[in-house]
Image (cartoon, rainbow, N blue to C red):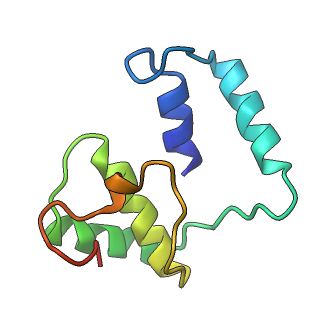
Amino acid sequence: MLCELYSVITNPRRVVLVSSPTEALSIISAMLALPGLHVLPTPIRAVAGWMQLLQRHPVTGANVFDLRIVATMQANGINRIYAFNSDDFKVKVLPNSWC
């Protein structure tokens, strides 16, 4: 989610080299210009899916961003994610998956 990226790179508690809002928007714009990169839409069913996931996995704080990514993926039929923070996508409560 681009919102999470923006949140992280503009937060001095999360990164050493903090981006200003203008720099963050520039970084996101550059990413969106990459060939082959597709930003998934957030269909209305993703909101319902996100709420169902929250009922099964009542996360708090920033973990809600990762759960929303999963809900958006599910609503778009995406089964796999490649991430630098793969541990954030492992279920802390249930052994198999967020789903």
User: Residue at coordinates 38% horizontally, 50% vertically from top-left?
Assistant: 65
Q: Residue furthest left?
A: 93
Residue 28 relative to residue 93: left or right: right
Q: Residue furthest bottom?
A: 77
Q: Position of residue 18 (x, y in %)?
A: 55, 15
User: Residue at coordinates 57% horizontally, 14% vertically from top-left?
Assistant: 17
User: Residue at coordinates 54% horizontally, 27% vertically from top-left?
Assistant: 9
Q: Nearer the viewer, residue 98 or 22?
A: 98
Q: Position of residue 88 (x, y in %)?
A: 33, 53
Whether 38 is drawn above or below 95: the answer is: above
Counting the numbered discs, the total is 0
Residue 96 relative to residue 84: left or right: left
Q: Position of residue 41 (x, y in %)?
A: 62, 67
Whether 64 is drawn above or below 52: the answer is: above
Residue 39 relative to residue 94: left or right: right
Residue 90, quarter of the rendered image: bottom left
Q: Position of residue 78 (x, y in %)?
A: 54, 79
Query: Considering the image in quadrants, where does the C terminus appear?
Result: bottom left
Whether 61 is drawn above or below 18: the answer is: below
